[in-house]
Image (cartoon, rainbow, N blue to C red):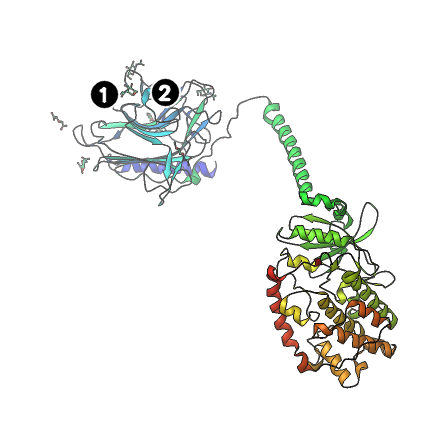
Amino acid sequence: MSFKLVTTVLASFVVHIAASASSPNDVGFIYQGFRSSNLSLDGLAEVTKSGLLQVTNFTKSQMGHAFYPNPINFKNNSNSSAFSFSTHFVFAIVPEVSGRSGHGLAFVIAPTRGLPGGLATIFLGLLNISTNGNADNHVFAVELDTVQNEEFNDINDNHVGIDINSLNSTVSKPAGYHEHEKNSFDNLTLGSSQLMQLWVEYDGVDKRIDVTLAPSKAVKPNTPLLSLSYDLSSLVQQTMYVGFSASTGILAAGTAHFVLGWSFKMNGIAQALDLSRLPNLPRLHSKKVSKFFTLGLPQICIFLLLIVIFGVAYYLRRKRKFAEVLEDWELAYGPHRIKYKDLYIATKGFREKELLGEGGFGQVYKGVLPANNMEVAVKKVSHQTRQGMREFIAEIVSIGRLRHRNLVPLLGYCRRKGELLLVYEFMSSGSLDSYLYNQPKSTLNWSQRLRIIKGVASGLFYLHEEWEQMVIHRDVKASNVLLDSELNGRLGDFGLARLYDHGSLPRTTHVVGTIGYLAPEQSRTGKATTSTDVYAFGAFLLEVICGRRPIDPEAPAEKVVLVDWVDSCWRAGDIFQVVDQNLSTLYVEEEAELVLKLGLLCSHSEPRTRPSMRQVLLYLERSAALPEFSPRGISATGFGFDDITMSLSFSEEKGRSPSLTESVLSCGR
Ligand SMILES: *[C@@H]1O[C@H](CO)[C@@H](O)[C@H](O)[C@H]1NC(C)=O
Ligand SMILES: *[C@@H]1O[C@H](CO)[C@@H](O)[C@H](O)[C@H]1NC(C)=O
Ligand SMILES: *[C@@H]1O[C@H](CO)[C@@H](O)[C@H](O)[C@H]1NC(C)=O
Ligand SMILES: *[C@@H]1O[C@H](CO)[C@@H](O)[C@H](O)[C@H]1NC(C)=O
Ligand SMILES: *[C@@H]1O[C@H](CO)[C@@H](O)[C@H](O)[C@H]1NC(C)=O
Ligand SMILES: *[C@@H]1O[C@H](CO)[C@@H](O)[C@H](O)[C@H]1NC(C)=O
Ligand SMILES: *[C@@H]1O[C@H](CO)[C@@H](O)[C@H](O)[C@H]1NC(C)=O
């Protein structure tokens, strides 16, 4: 015997003791499942093995009755008024075909156990055509009606009604409930196979009938669905029977009406049902069909469905994985667009192993293009808005046409949602700054450094003056100089800073320019010019010769700002003290002095004093002599570390303001 059975037996045992022990006017009972009950059943009604009260099964045009076997006193004598009573039950209306339930279930109080004249279908097993509306019936019912019958003025096909001697309900409302302590009203569908609870309460003093419906898990609502002022004293006889009546329809499929638990109390409040102890509803629609249909077919269907779902999911995932953004205006740049799928394959799915580095704009991955086995570097730039993307792509593509042996060639681009991918030729020797700072990579010797400097100068000159449009690099620095297999310096990342100006990058990602390379006037105005590029180039020269960054916060105070340190060493007559220790004495003093002074000249705080890149090339080639200029004093430049940080935050502000930006490509020079 299961635990449930034991408790059910115990419960009903307790019930009967309670019923027989107290006053005959205070009858009460509770059925948490009906397994050991002694209900009076007729028609289709039966108690299933699991203890469910099944008032009807799926047979059509039939009815069933289930009554508490003993008569109950409803008043003291035939002349007195009716007692208060309350009942609570959990039910489910299960149609064979979902959405087509009929006809309904009713809680009923009647003078007899069987409702002998009751008819099926529209009469719910309660009455018949000749008795409907007759005061001699002494029949009280609360109907849970799932069919709209115009014969009885039904309001709809899903309502709860109070029936007094008649199937024409005295009052009725669409099924639903006011959630406990809330004002909302939620609809319920009676014939939905869902478990629901119903409370019917009669107040013998106030002469009021309250009917409350709720889903099975809900707390009893404060507000009843139906509340009718009515004196049942003349309807009820001294002893009555309580129970359930239900009927199935004529049409199509039948409906099973289940009651899972039921409590009743005369002159008191019905005991609450413990929902966890109620029997379970049977597996629905278990018609005996061949095993193929019950087992084989559904399994095959599920299998096929799974295949389809996986197929669609795979297709969608793949589609999303390789999705690109392509707008009409981009069609003109067709040859410069590279398929995301190709880049994905090239970088082996942007594997961490392929990560070359992480710059201010995003990660750079190494890859091999599947089409031509070409080694490339793919830069992933995340951007948030489309704003400015069109102009930027136009520039990228035009920059892509730049060809110079000291520039890193841009091969093409690809656009995805929130992501821009720029594809560059792969530079096998990596970036210059790793040679300068990340030992143990071999130290560059003097002639290599000089060659790199000349190469970068020539590349920058090409950008400024030799190409059809003037291009301002905006971010000249050692980490943007890449070395090819022959250790030629090649400028990379040109024009990328424009993406920031176009407002396509989040402000926090990058500052236009880099600390230590920003010309003072650029910090003030936010405006990049060829002259500000020259300033950065000056800082770069010092960086390469001295083997340290333009600003080193950890250096002793007088050495923090490289320009100032070189400057002060020159004034002190010992400029060679600044040359990279790694070179020891293996450098040409004359050339070192020239490059250091040129660096100072380029990084002069007064823009007009700075040479053009054309002049820089002449000085480097010794075709022209460096002009005489005196070391600047700190007071003259007034450009200490504090100023740099201050002006930097200032430039960030400017970078955000579009009015202060200007196009990197000043056309029609
Ligand atoms: C319904 O119950 C009746 C009486 O118990 C029985 O004869 C009939 O076969 C049942 N129908 C179904 C569909 O279970
Ligand atoms: C069950 O109820 C019937 C009356 O409907 C009664 O005759 C019978 O004694 C009851 N049996 C039990 C076990 O209560
Ligand atoms: C029924 O009678 C009892 C005692 O005789 C009395 O206390 C009770 O109020 C009466 N109830 C009604 C509804 O008349
Ligand atoms: C009920 O009332 C009727 C008339 O009002 C009276 O004749 C009858 O004796 C009363 N019955 C009881 C049981 O009080
Ligand atoms: C209607 O019900 C009454 C009483 O239950 C019965 O006498 C009568 O024969 C029934 N009429 C029909 C048409 O079933
Ligand atoms: C029930 O309502 C129908 C439709 O309005 C009406 O024809 C019939 O007479 C009513 N019956 C009763 C008993 O009120
Ligand atoms: C609830 O049912 C009524 C009619 O029965 C309908 O008018 C109303 O739109 C339904 N509300 C919701 C939220 O479905």
Which of the 4 image quarters holds residue 294?
top right
Relative placement, left or right, of 152 versus 314 is left
Q: Residue at x 49, y 30 (%)?
A: 282
Pointer 2 and pointer 1: residues touching (CB < 8 Å)?
no
Residue 265 numbered tag: none
Q: Position of residue 293 (x, y in %)?
A: 60, 24
Q: Which residue is mark 2?
A: 122
Residue farthest along the bottom direction in this orientation: 572
Question: Horizontal and vertical percent for residue 574?
Answer: 80, 84
Q: Which residue appears at 50% of the width and 28% of the height?
A: 284
User: Which is nearer the eye, 182 or 409?
Assistant: 409
**Residue 264 visible in the snapshot:** no
The answer to which of 77 and 466 lies nearer the viewer is 466
Decide which of 193, 432 is in the foreground and name it: 432
Amino acid type, mark 2:
Ile
Disc 1 marks a residue whose amino acid type is Asp
In screen coordinates, is 481 left or right of 114?
A: right
Q: Which residue is mark 1?
A: 136
Helix, strand or loop status at disc 1 = helix
In this picture, is 211 found above or below 529? above
In the image, residue 575 above or below residue 281: below
Q: Residues within 10 Å of mark 1 (few under 14, many from 20)?
A: few
* Label 2 element class: helix
